[in-house]
Amino acid sequence: MKEDLKQNLIQKGKTSPIACNVLAALFAFAEVWALPWMLPVSGEKERLGYTNSIFSFLLFGAFFWLIQRALSTGFSGKKSRWLVPGLLGTLFSGCMVFGARLDQRGSVPFQSGSMWISILILAVVGSLLIRYFWDRLFEWTEGRAGRAFQERNSGTMEETMDPGRRPKSFLLTAGVIFLCYLPVFLAVYPGFFVYDAQEEYLQVVTRNFSTHHPLLHVLLLGGIIQLVYKLTDSYNLGIACYTLIQMGVLSFIFAGCVEALRARGLKKAGRILLTLYFGICPVLVMFSLCSAKDGLFTGMLLIMVLLLQELCEAPEQFFGNKRKGALLWAAALLMMLLRHNGFYAFFVFAVFCCWYLKKIWRKLLPYFLSMVLSYLIVNGALTGILHADASENQEILTVTISQLARVYGDEKDKLPKEEAEVLYRYLPREALEAYRPKVTDGVKIHFNNEAYEKDRAGYLKLWLKWGLRHPFTYLNAWFMTSYGFWYPDTVIDVYRGNSVFTYTYEDSSYFGYEVEAPGVRESKIPWLDECYRRMSLTIAQQKIPAVSMAFSPGFLFWVTAFFLGFLFYQRRPGQAVPFLLPLLVWLTVILGPTYLVRYVVFLWAVAPVLVFTVFHGPGRTGDPE
């Protein structure tokens, strides 16, 4: 009976064959016409190379086939079922068009009518195809999820997600991941000591601390290096010890992830592949061996996602396990202490999670509040004990600084003298002249915090006044520092021309790679060291079709958005909620000074868990009808 009703709904959603073909042809033509707006085509000659080409005809045929299949299959259910695919399709289309313009010309032509028409066409077709693929994905996963649910209820699955119940398997997995890291460690010995590493170390040496970097990481990094240096008189040994400790910690965390997914039904072949992924994926390897806080932050965030999945699935059972409750509490505290933006993301997530799990909010609220208060107490205590300088405001004002600098660069000869004088109180002329659209560091480092503390209202007033006068300039300034996070096709070259300790950035600044002073690179496997140098500082991987996307922050974001949107579309919000925390962290980084892989490396760690959840997720909470 239910199947008959389902088939009737599908039949009602179908389009007649003739109308289907006509609509598919019209949609396909419109899509091919609009497509150049999301491709690196900037001039008439380049566009002619696309329009007057058999390639465009082949694209027309491919789109016609896809759209015809989607229309002939039909779409059942309420009109509201178009909301999620419509939002995702529109967002994707807009980001691709904006990203292509920013990458080619450094700005989005907001007043171009043909651009908006193209976005509309791309959004309509994109939404249609997204829903079609989601419906097919639902049919594919329905049986798999049902079998996994039956296995769990019949007791054939693991009884727990605690790796402590399978110590041999857990230790073996961690050992394999660590052994995968070792050759790279030897190749880049003593490790990647980069991204403000020298500055953090010197804070410990000079006892002159600042809250610019998380104090917990400053003490951990600088303390280990200085301790080993005192014992061995070798900076390299100190850096190597820190790197090995971090490698070990992340190996255990990634192994815990593999064991957690084993408990949920991940088969042996999948566990082997996931273990190799954690051990070999170049992006994860780079930051597992890097002194930057982003590796440990990623590990804490991954632990939180895995445990939040258990919390959302079975709250009472989760709170009955004190060990898991303590582990989530500790991971949340460390995540917030390792990156300032982790606090803002977690605070918003905690509010949303309490609303979603409203039946247990009286238990959940004090639990989350204790995490937040502990962070504030520990962070405040470290600041006070170390007498750390907490006067910097430019990190939270990064976007506004880039916007003011862009308006100044475009309009400096037309600006009223009194407005320019106000700006100079906060940002000196020399800093404004050094403004670069893709990175704000060169300007914000000269921000006058003393002037800002004396007259915050003056800064805000100027920012609002210029924003009302130049709204599109403000948008372009913000987009230029963030589009690498949401435009898959960009090459990360934000530091082009910058000279560091051992080299000058050229066509790529994908990863820092070097060893900052006082460390020195002593490679034991030069050919492997050269491989990582090329991946970090050249466009080597961007030259390989398809493989290049595995290194793209923008691509990883859209993979995450596609599968997360699918969970909401399939009415599995309980499985989607834990992944909102990484999404909130992502929202904080697009407000940062530039786009670098280090800020979103967690996407590479969380993506396998999300994909597994889609295909083998516990329980079913609805269906697309």
Image (tube, grey):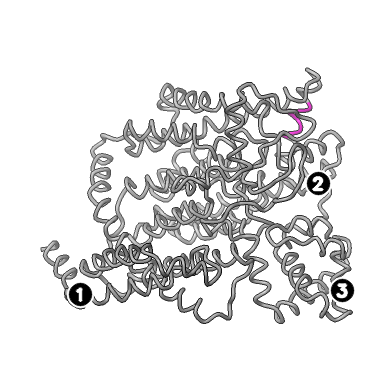
Q: Where is residue 421 in the image (x, y as percent from the top left)?
A: 89, 74
Q: Residue furthest top?
A: 232
Task: Classify mark 2: helix, strand or loop.
Answer: loop
Residues under numbered marks 1 and 2 in contact, where contact means CB atoms less than 8 Å apart? no
The quadrant in which the N terminus is found is bottom left
Viewer-nearest residue: 547 or 376: 547
Q: Where is residue 402 in the image (x, y as percent from the top left)?
A: 73, 65
Which of disc 2 and disc 1 is earlier in sequence? 1
Residue that carries the numbered disc 3 in the rendered image: 422
Q: Give the range drawn in magenta.
A: 220-226
Q: Is residue 312 above or below residue 207?
A: below
Task: Classify mark 1: helix, strand or loop.
Answer: loop
CA–CA distance in space, label 3 to label 1: 63 Å
Report whether 113 appears left or right of 125.
Answer: right
Q: Which labelled disc corresponds to residue 15?
A: 1
Name the residue located 18 percent from the left edge and 77 percent from the top edge.
18
Residue that carries the numbered disc 2 in the rendered image: 210
Which of disc 3 and disc 2 is earlier in sequence? 2
Residues under numbered marks 2 and 3 in contact, where contact means CB atoms less than 8 Å apart? no
Report whether 435 appears left or right of 272.
Answer: right
Name the residue type under label 3. Answer: Val
Rate crowding at label 2 as few (under 14), some (14 to 19) or many (20 or more) other CA atoms within 10 Å.
some
Question: For residue 184, which quarter of the picture?
Answer: top right
Name the residue type under label 1. Answer: Thr
Name the residue type under label 2. Answer: Ser
Viewer-nearest residue: 404 or 385: 404
